[in-house]
Amino acid sequence: MSEIDKIRCSACGKTKRPTDYYVSYSSFHRDTGKLHVCKMCILDSITSKESLINTLRMIDKPFIETLFTSSTEESEKTGKAVWGLYMKNVSMGQYKTFTWNESDFKGHSNPKTEEVDNSDEVVLSKNIIRKWGRGYTESDIDYLENFYNEYDNTYATDTPVQINLYKNIAKIHLQAEKDLAENNTKSFKELMELSSKLHNDGNIKPIQSTGANDDKGVSTYGLWIKEIEQDEPCEFFENKPLYEDYDKLKKYWEDWFVRPFKNIFNLSKDFNVRDDD
């Protein structure tokens, strides 16, 4: 794919930036990696489900019934046009390389994914809705789950507040990725600032770790220090008999250096000392 600054739309004839076109993996668009019709012309041609299907056929993009349903739910939730949401969703995630020949008009499982048992699918759907809410596509859920699991494996999830915080951060980054794909840099910047604020509010730092997957290094040492400071407050050792002379160096010095010298100079007559005392 060549590096280009402008692409001429074959529908309106206007020359526009590459970001004004949807991504295409068709061999007929391999030079630009973009459709030959701009986003505006495509969306202007869609006024119904039938016209959406017809447009997808012409630009060699698939129609996926389940994706259309989830895009409709997302439209009802966000107020955005369902046609634009479908085009955005079908150009991202696992569908981005699909062609018209991989369309699914009956809501079957995706042609390129494993088939799952229907009963398990119902339970999974309920759990996903309970966790993330409605209005997300399958690719959205994959992103959210992967993002959340990374935080779950890296940071503590001891309280509901922490769990909800990680979920909210995942949602913010999902929307940020979508805005960046649509070249909406202003919204992307605002979402990144909100993400940074949530990280600060939750005291989440890159160097933090639960230590679950660490066997050595700074993380383990830091967790050891944290445990001492939480369970054994820092104070003078003379007030901490549990740790005073923990290695018995003081006792060894008293028994085998101080005691013999006292005996030599007749300062004491203490000979009853054993190695195992």
Image: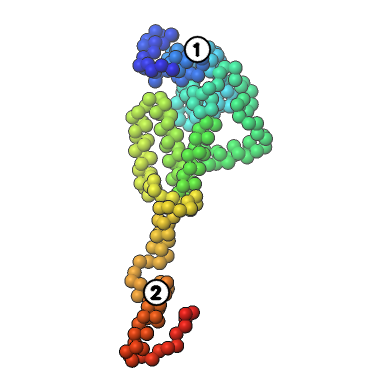
- How many marks overall? 2
x then y, percent, for residue 237? 35, 72
Horizontal relation, residue 37 to residue 5: left or right = right
- Asked if 128 appears above or below 275 in the picture, the reply is above
Residue at 48 percent across and 42 percent down: it is: 150
- Mark 1 neighbour class, 10 Å CA radius: few under 14, some 14 to 19, many 20 or more: few
Q: Callout 2, which amino acid? A: Leu
Residue 48 visible in the picture: no
Residue at 45 percent across and 53 percent down: it is: 216
Per the rendering, the mark at residue 249 is 2
x then y, percent, for residue 28? 50, 12
Horizontal relation, residue 100 to residue 19: left or right = right
Q: Nearer the viewer, residue 140 or 80?
A: 140
Horizontal relation, residue 265 to residue 158: left or right = left
- Asked if 275 appears above or below 12 in the picture, the reply is below
Q: Nearer the viewer, residue 121 or 9?
A: 9
- Mark 2 neighbour class, 10 Å CA radius: few under 14, some 14 to 19, many 20 or more: few
Q: Callout 1, which amino acid? A: Phe
Q: Nearer the viewer, mark 2 or mark 1?
A: 2
- Asked if 235 appears above or below 12 in the picture, the reply is below
Secondary structure beneath label 2: helix
Location of mark 1 (residue): 28
Is disc 2 in contact with disc 1, using a CB cutoff of under 8 Å? no
x then y, percent, for residue 50? 56, 15
Q: Nearer the viewer, residue 239 or 186?
A: 239
Secondary structure beneath label 1: helix
Q: Nearer the viewer, residue 69 or 61?
A: 61
- Asked if 246 appears above or below 109 in the picture, the reply is below
Q: Which numbered disc, 2 or 1, marks the residue that appears first in the sequence? A: 1
Residue at 57 percent across and 17 percent down: it is: 100
